[in-house]
Amino acid sequence: MQSRPSAFVFFGKVMVDMATGTPAIPANRNALAKELIFRALVLPACRSTFDRVWLKVEGPVPHPADGPLIIYMNHPGWWDGYMAFLLDTIVFRRGFESYIMMEEKQLRAYRFFTWCGAFSVDRKRPGEAARSIAYGSHLLRERRDRILWILPQGRIVPNDRRPVTVYPGVARLAQQTRDVLLWPVALRYEFRGEQRPEAFIRAGPAHLVDVAAAEETIVADVRLHLTAAVDALRDDVNDERLERYRTLLRGKAGVNRVWDDVVAFWRQSLRRLPGMPGQPSPPAGNRAPGSQQ
């Protein structure tokens, strides 16, 4: 029989009343630890896994003065949190103070992510989910220069499954925060002409929602924006319309690129050898005696 959760949780020596809107695992931001995690874990993993990470931004990139900001992404794979890390560090240049909702079970296993602003959410326990939403909206209300990253699909979902599922937590966060900007982000991972996969990110444009509207109306609005972003990214990749995408991160070369580079270097070296095709003939006065004219 599962034990009933206590009304109080202890963090260090501090007793926190669960009724005040604190999740089971709150964020414990540490700027130095976050930087170390990015450089020692996230960045090497992305470089060793992906040939390239592509990015296209629709509209202006939100500025901290425009915040607070809720960034909601689709959830097609395990790497989605790392993509958020890349956007936060490279695109936003750490200008925002970032937080992210993370499944409680996963956060208990990788608790060091609390140093990066992660806090827990458990959709299976309505009380816990409500506390996480109250906690997230409180963080956003406190300061304009804050981002809350969320994955409103709640679990990994195949990229092209429709309709796109959006749980109501994003609407409740917007309603409780009230003055907040939203930014949709679409993610996709594809094997194309390289040994390693490529990641594609399509972000924006930012938009507002009517926080006075019914929860279902806000959910429908978010679903509309997220579906449009995901569909547009799919079409761009399938039609190879990548001229407006830029390289956010270049990964390690796969075997095919390494081999192509070796072959190109070998051919260039051969062309530099005297007498090889492509080399200019020596002047007539410098030809060896007995050479044919």
Image: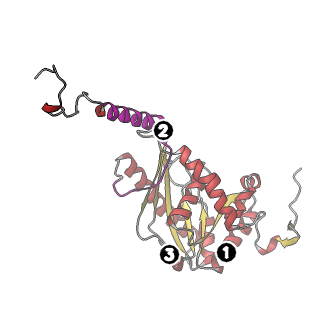
Residue at the disc numbered 2: 254
Among the 4 quarters of the image, the one containing residue 204: bottom left
Give how far apart the Cα atoms at labels 1 and 2 are. 42 Å
For label 2, the SS is loop
For label 3, the SS is loop
Q: Could you tell me which residue is drawn at 39 percent across and 35 percent down?
A: 260
Give how far apart the Cα atoms at labels 3 and 1 are. 17 Å
Q: Quadrant of the C terminus?
A: top left
Residue at the disc numbered 1: 139
**Numbered disc in front, either 3 or 1:** 3
Among the 4 quarters of the image, the one containing residue 117: bottom right
The magenta region covers 243-270
Identity of the residue furthest to the left in this view: 293
Would residue 165 appear left or right of 136 to someone viewing this image?
A: left
Q: Residue 140, percent across and down?
A: 63, 75
Q: Residue 184, percent across and down?
A: 50, 63
Foreground residue, 225 or 267? 267
In the drawing, what numbered circle is on residue 63? Answer: 3
Q: Residue 268, percent across and down?
A: 32, 35
User: Does the segment drawn in magenta span residue 46?
Assistant: no
Mark 3 or mark 1, which has the lower sequence index? 3
Label 3, residues with CA under 10 Å away: few <14, some 14-19, many ≥20: some
Asked if the residues shown at circle 3 and circle 1 are in contact, with their CB atoms under 8 angstroms apart, the answer is no
Mark 1 or mark 2, which has the lower sequence index? 1
Q: Could you tell me which residue is drawn at 61 percent across and 75 percent down?
A: 175
Among the 4 quarters of the image, the one containing residue 229: bottom left
Q: Residue flagged by tag 3: what amino acid is it?
A: His
Give how far apart the Cα atoms at labels 2 and 3 are. 36 Å
Would residue 26 appear left or right of 46 to someone viewing this image?
A: right
